[in-house]
């Protein structure tokens, strides 16, 4: 059994590449009059399956409570400590020894945020910022932790000027003496640009130019989307436009291989009288849509498919924060751990409060290429094992008789068959997740509050796959593995290729398939053949 165990471990290891997809994290501030204890914080994180967090310091009690949880942690060097660290290699080394080296590997520290919005919040410390980055990184190198832990510094998106159209964006040239060497540092160390993106403030400061729906990720008709005249890229939300502005600004400085991680983003749920759009509904809408957008791994128009991992601001309301009323109401929870509204935090079904993932749907993207939609529809109704009988003429979902409408029904059915897990609403980029129920008339979509919507393997609009069938509803292994791999498994089992194929398909159906994006089989949905394709 040892060889088989080894093969399955190797296969599971290869499937774990899904971990490289975008993730959602949460910021944890501590300006609360009734701050929960570290053990209470960790208990909340575990109950909500929050696997990525950002701390605004490196608090000993919090790090101790996080030990052996596996939670990925970004620790921070507060601005008030930046001058000392940026002026002394020894001070930086001492900070790393005390706050990082002393805790790993039990504490899963994956990044260090050096300062916070230094260029705009603490400009007098800007001259030592790059030195601070280098000193901290050198200390990690000395401890052999530089590959495990990345070093960067969070920036306000306001340092990017002329951010729309994104293709014309550039960093404020006043800060070139800092930004240029900083980007070179990020590039040479394999780190990423930490960016704080707040469409709420962009919307508030636009004096009505930016529509609220555009800031909240609400669907827009194609004629309402913002178009970059230089690239002809369409932007359906402020978030993507700001992230792409950062990419274009870096490219302007000849830096093209530094990814962006959004370290803060959110929407307040309460504000002063001059902040009428700081509401519970808008906060819920923004954060829910942001999470769905990030976990869908669609990337941005400039870099489609490239993950933009994002940390929600923030876990708790911070009633002690100074400034406008809205500063106190960004949290997902109150100090007692009670959620302020329902909100999806993972792609695996865990939610805040008593919400269910039946309130999300997978739809065809408006304006998507009709041939790609048809191919995806054919796959969903064929190898994807979706019951598409409701789309036949005379059935409740036949009208409107369009590829987009029919694809939306099939995509959503597949999405719900697969448990609404992350990655099952992609279909080569022609599908997207929405919180708007696409049901209409007597056509009730799976996941809707209505009673209809079936998941049985019944009549299909597409011909059945010619590949060897399995008893599972998942596509056959022919879509994801080669005969050579099956031969290796067969040899290890001292068995023939057919037995190996059956064994692997059983494992694939139960373990690997839920991790496979539906576009994988779509790329080769025809009969298996040794002949070259045209």
Image (cartoon, rainbow, N blue to C red):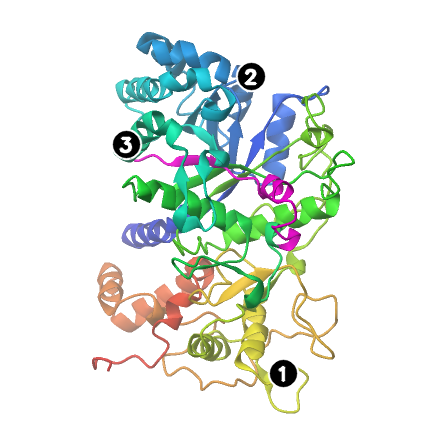
Q: Is residue 317 visible?
A: yes
Residue under pointer 3: 184
Left or right position of 512 against 197: left
Where disc 1 sits, the SS reads: loop
422 is higher (above) or lower (below) than 320: below
Q: Earlier in the sequence, mark 3 or mark 2?
A: 2
Q: Nearer the viewer, residue 39 or 355?
A: 355
Q: Tell me where the magenta segment starts and ends, as one range.
A: 190-213
135 is higher (above) or lower (below) than 391: above
Q: Quadrant of the C terminus?
A: bottom left
286 is higher (above) or lower (below) than 54: below
Quadrant position of residue 175? top left
CA separation in Å, label 2 and label 1: 59 Å
Residue 400 is marked as 1
In the rendering, at what x and y percent does residue 255 appear? 29, 40
224 is higher (above) or lower (below) than 461: above
In the rendering, at what x and y percent does residue 40 appear? 65, 26
Residue at image location 67% in from the left, 34% down from the top: 331
Q: Nearer the viewer, residue 148 or 366?
A: 366
Find out whether the residues at labels 2 and 1 contact each other: C-beta distance under 8 Å.
no
Left or right position of 92 against 32: left
Q: Earlier in the sequence, mark 3 or mark 1?
A: 3
In the rendering, at what x and y percent does residue 24 appear? 52, 43
Residue at image location 55% in from the left, 23% down from the top: 65
Residue 61 is marked as 2
Q: Is residue 308 visible?
A: no
Residue, far bottom: 394
In the rendering, at what x and y percent does residue 396 appear? 68, 84
> Label 1 crowding class (10 Å Cα cut-off): few <14, some 14-19, many 20+?
few
Where disc 3 sits, the SS reads: helix
| Closer mark to the observer between disc 3 and disc 2 | 3
- Residue 328 counted in the magenta span: no
């Amino acid at each position: 059994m040892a060889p088989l165990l080894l093969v399955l471990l190797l296969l599971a290891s290869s499937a774990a590449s899904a971990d490289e997809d975008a993730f959602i994290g949460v910021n944890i501030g501590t300006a609360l009059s009734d701050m929960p204890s570290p053990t209470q914080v960790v208990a909340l994180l575990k109950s909500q399956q929050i696997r990525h967090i950002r701390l605004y310091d490196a608090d000993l009690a919090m790090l101790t409570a996080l030990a052996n949880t596996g939670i990925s942690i970004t620790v921070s060097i507060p601005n008030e400590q930046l001058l000392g660290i940026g002026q002394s290699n020894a001070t930086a080394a001492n900070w790393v020894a005390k706050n990082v080296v002393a805790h790993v590997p039990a504490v899963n520290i994956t990044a260090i945020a050096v300062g916070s919005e230094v260029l705009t919040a603490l400009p007098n410390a800007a001259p030592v910022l790059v030195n601070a980055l280098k000193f901290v990184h050198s200390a990690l190198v000395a401890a052999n932790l530089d590959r495990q832990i990345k070093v960067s510094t969070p920036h306000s998106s306001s340092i990017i000027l002329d951010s729309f159209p994104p293709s014309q964006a550039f960093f404020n040239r006043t800060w070139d003496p800092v930004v240029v060497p900083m980007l070179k540092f990020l590039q040479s160390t394999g780190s990423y640009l930490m960016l704080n993106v707040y469409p709420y403030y962009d919307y508030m400061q636009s004096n009505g130019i930016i529509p609220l729906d555009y800031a909240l990720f609400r669907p827009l008709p194609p004629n309402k989307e913002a178009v970059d005249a230089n690239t002809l890229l369409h932007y359906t939300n402020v978030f993507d436009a700001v992230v792409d502005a950062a990419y274009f600004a870096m490219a302007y400085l000849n830096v093209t291989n530094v990814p962006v991680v959004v370290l803060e983003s959110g929407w307040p749920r309460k504000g002063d009288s001059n902040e009428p759009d700081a509401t519970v509904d808008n906060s819920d809408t923004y954060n829910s849509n942001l999470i769905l957008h990030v976990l869908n791994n669609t990337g941005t128009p400039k870099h489609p498919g490239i993950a933009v991992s994002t940390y929600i601001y923030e876990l708790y309301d911070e009633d002690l924060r100074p400034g406008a009323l809205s500063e106190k109401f960004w949290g997902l929870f109150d100090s007692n751990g009670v959620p302020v509204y329902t909100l999806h935090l993972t792609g695996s079904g865990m939610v805040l409060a008593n919400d269910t993932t039946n309130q999300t749907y997978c739809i065809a993207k408006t304006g998507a290429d009709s041939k790609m939609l048809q191919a995806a529809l054919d796959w969903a109704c064929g190898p994807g094992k979706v019951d598409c009988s409701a789309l036949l003429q005379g059935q409740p979902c036949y009208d409107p008789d369009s590829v987009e409408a029919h694809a939306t029904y099939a995509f959503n059915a597949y999405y719900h068959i697969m448990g609404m897990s992350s990655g099952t609403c992609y279909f080569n980029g022609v599908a997207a997740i929405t919180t708007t129920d696409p049901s209409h008339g007597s056509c009730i979509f799976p996941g809707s509050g209505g009673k209809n919507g079936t998941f049985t393997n019944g009549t299909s609009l597409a011909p059945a796959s010619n590949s060897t069938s399995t008893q599972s509803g998942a596509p056959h292994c022919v879509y994801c593995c080669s005969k050579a791999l099956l031969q290796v498994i067969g040899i290890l089992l001292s068995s023939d290729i057919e037995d190996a194929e059956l064994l692997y398909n059983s494992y694939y159906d139960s373990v690997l398939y839920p991790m496979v994006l539906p576009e994988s089989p779509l790329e080769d949905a025809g009969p298996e053949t040794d002949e070259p394709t045209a």
